[in-house]
Amino acid sequence: MRLEGKTALVTGSDQGIGKAIAVRLAQEGADVVINYRSNAASAAETLKEVEATGRQGFVVQADLSKIADTKHLVDEGVAHFGKLDILVNNAGVEKRADFWDVTEEDYNTVISTNMTGVFFTTQRFVQQLIAANQGGKIVNISSVHEDLPFPHFTSYCMSKGALRMMMRNLAIELAPLGININNIAPGAIETPINTKLLNDPVLLASLQHNIPLGRLGKPEDVASMAAYLVSDEANYVTAATFFVDGGLIWNYHEQ
């Protein structure tokens, strides 16, 4: 098992991609801090699946749009397991609206969760690594929209573009500390955030036409990449974005 003896924190791990990553890292031997914002029942299900692998799980409620909660989340994980080796910044939200109709509330929700929350969760994680005099691995779950325009989702694209630059900058700053950081940029994945799309045959067929591999991705497709990036096999990998999108980004065009 590639992650035996490691402890991982996966934000937003009560469902979707985050849940798949939490379970996969446990299968690879890691104990896992499971985070949720409001769905305690789903977090409990993730915990059950993590524990079924034989590893330990620990659930912490935290709203990552609140800076105090980001610190609380990391501190609770360290207090419970004694250390954290891996951080996967997965939690994120999106709000659809024409640019001229975007509300201040929706804008702030997206930016504070997807960008500010990731910044301060990562900062607290790095502070804990420095205090423990150890290295670590950080993976941000970004999006193809860190590069690819997505009309009507401008704040979301802004937040993911910011993650790309944050990752590149921190890769240089954190390398002397033995800390690697990379992004995973999923394309269209079968998750709750895409429920409307999955239930609309016309929209789904149109999107699949843009994907060279001819299907939407599964959360497990992203989890496999995450498991590699946080393992010792990726010790010489940092400052990179890995697209898990079936070729979508190079073939996408608006219908």
Image (tube, rainbow, N blue to C red):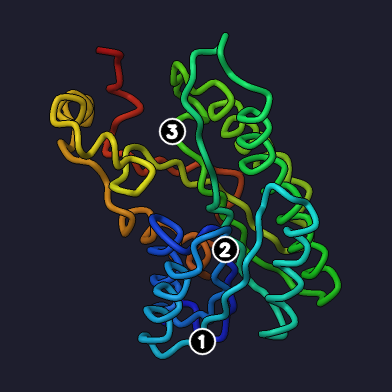
Q: Which residue lies at the image location 77% right of the left edge and 69% below the top edge?
A: 129
54 sits to left or right of 84: left
Query: At numbered mark 3, what does the secondary structure look like: helix, strand or loop?
Result: helix
Q: Residue 86 lies in what quarter of the image?
A: bottom right
Q: Which residue lies at the image location 20% right of the left edge and 38% below the top edge?
A: 199
Query: What mark, if any, has residue 144 been given in the picture?
Result: 3
**Badge 2 is on which residue?**
235
- Above or below residue 183? Residue 146 is above
Residue type at mark 1? Gln
- Above or below residue 21? Residue 114 is above
**Badge 1 is on which residue?**
56
Separation of marks 3 and 1 at Cα, in angstroms: 32 Å
Asked if the residues shown at circle 3 and circle 1 are in contact, with their CB atoms under 8 angstroms apart, the answer is no
Q: What is the quadrant of the N terminus in the image?
A: bottom left
Dot 3 surroundings within 10 Å: few (below 14), some, or many (20 or more)? many
Q: Residue 202 lies in what quarter of the image?
A: top left
- In this view of the protein, can residue 71 be seen by the observer? yes
Q: Which residue lies at the image location 65% right of the left edge and 55% below the top edge?
A: 63
Q: Which of 250 and 44 is in front in this view?
A: 44
* Tag in front: 3 or 2: 3
36 sits to left or right of 55: right
Separation of marks 3 and 2 at Cα, in angstroms: 24 Å
First in residue order: circle 2 vs circle 1 = 1
Dot 1 surroundings within 10 Å: few (below 14), some, or many (20 or more)? some
Relative image position of residue 93 (x, y in whole percent): 52, 41
Separation of marks 2 and 1 at Cα, in angstroms: 25 Å
Relative image position of residue 14 (x, y in whole percent): 46, 64
Residue type at mark 3? Val
Query: At numbered mark 2, what does the secondary structure look like: helix, strand or loop?
Result: loop
First in residue order: circle 3 vs circle 1 = 1
Asked if the residues shown at circle 2 and circle 1 are in contact, with their CB atoms under 8 angstroms apart, the answer is no
